[in-house]
Image: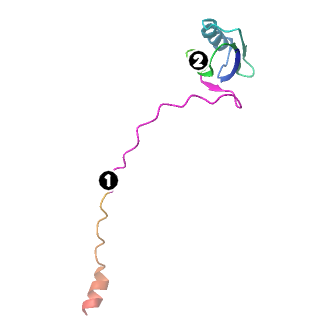
Amino acid sequence: MAETVVLRVAMSCQGCAGAVKRVLTNMEVESFEVDLQEQKVTVKGDVTPEAVFQTVSKSGKKTSFWEGEAKEPAPAPEPEAVAAPAEPVPEAAPDVATAAAATA
């Protein structure tokens, strides 16, 4: 079944749009449209959103799913940060004036 995938792709010129078109030409899709002004790429075909996302990302352009479309692929989980051991808090030195008053 044909699916429509819509991506937001950072394209600033015709060369950028051409790079996106080149990578999409290598994908077997029914059709695709590259809208430079809207920075929008629409792909129709028997494809998965993830496959289209990965292919367009190969153009080197910043790529994300269009708002309201499928969610972006989850980034690889980052290793959990290990908290550094807390530095011991040095004991406060007794106030000299208070110590002298207490002994007087």
Q: Residue at x 67, y 9 (%)?
A: 29
* SS type, badge 2: helix
Relative to the observer, which residue lies in front, 78 or 93?
78
Q: Magenta segment, which residues?
A: 62-86
Q: Residue at x 70, y 8 (%)?
A: 30
Q: Main secondary structure of the magenta part?
A: loop
Farthest-out residue, bottom: 104
The image quadrant that residue 15 belongs to is top right
The image quadrant that residue 68 belongs to is top right
CA separation, marks 1 and 2? 43 Å
Residue 70, placed above or below residue 35: below
Q: Quadrant of the N terminus?
A: top right
Farthest-out residue, left: 103
The image quadrant that residue 70 belongs to is top right
Asked if the stretch drawn in magenta spans residue 67, the answer is yes
Q: Residue at x 65, y 9 (%)?
A: 21
Amino acid found under the numbered disc labelled 2: Ala
Residue on which disc 1 sits: 85
Contact? badges 1 and 2 (CB < 8 Å): no
Amino acid found under the numbered disc labelled 1: Pro
